[in-house]
Image: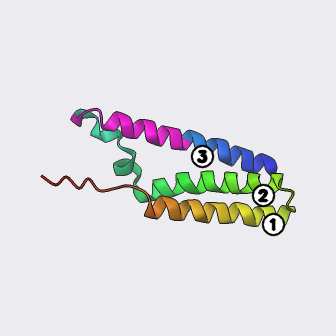
């Protein structure tokens, strides 16, 4: 199971870095708006990335803490749920330009 958590963590980190890079590239100019991951993948994409990373990190943490396989799986699921909640409620901010 540790290999599954490790693969999930690596894929989640790669997806998160790609999300950030695409967001930065999209904000570089108006002609690059098609790169914006929030408009391309939306909330479901953000939740998928955060769930993958949270599952991997939760499972790795629980496994290396010495938890049994079943408890480590519960820790991985709890990590995924926590990451989804963070991605959902602390996700994208609306641009509140006061002018």
Crowding at label 3, few (<14), some or many (≥20) Cα neighbours within 10 Å?
A: many
From the viewer's perspective, tell me whether residue 37 is left or right of residue 11. left
Residue 87 x, y percent position in the rendering: 49, 58
In the rendered image, residue 17 lying in the magenta stretch gets the answer yes
Q: Is residue 46 above or below residue 28?
A: below
Residue at image location 79% in from the left, 46% down from the top: 3
Pointer 1 local density, CA inside 10 Å: few below 14, some 14–19, many at least 20: some
Secondary structure at badge 2 equals helix
Position of residue 70 measured from the top left corner of the image (x, y, whole percent): 83, 66
| Left/right of residue 71 with respect to residue 34 in the rendered view | right
Marks 2 and 1, Cα distance to the nearest angstrom? 7 Å
- Label 3 secondary element: helix
Q: How many numbered discs?
A: 3
What's drawn in magenta, residue-wise? 15-30
How far is the residue under mark 3 from the one under mark 1? Answer: 21 Å
The residue carrying mark 3 is 12
Residue 62 circle label: 2
Q: Quadrant of residue 72?
A: bottom right
| Label 1 SS | helix
Percent position (x, y) of residue 38? 37, 50
At x 26%, y 53%, the residue is 95
The residue that appears at 80% across and 49% down in the rendered structure is 2
Determine the image quadrant of residue 98. bottom left
From this view, report whether residue 41 is shown above or below residue 74. Answer: above
Q: Is residue 84 left or right of residue 75?
A: left
Residue linked to disc 1: 71
């Amino acid at each position: 199971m540790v290999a599954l958590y490790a693969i999930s963590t690596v894929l989640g980190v790669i997806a998160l870095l790609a999300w950030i890079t695409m967001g930065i590239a999209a904000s570089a100019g108006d002609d690059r708006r098609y790169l914006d991951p929030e408009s391309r993948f939306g909330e479901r994409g953000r939740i998928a990335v955060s769930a993958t990373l949270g599952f991997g990190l939760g499972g790795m943490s629980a496994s290396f803490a010495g938890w049994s396989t079943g408890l480590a799986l519960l820790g991985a699921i709890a990590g995924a749920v926590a990451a989804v909640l963070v991605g959902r409620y602390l996700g994208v901010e609306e641009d509140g330009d006061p002018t």
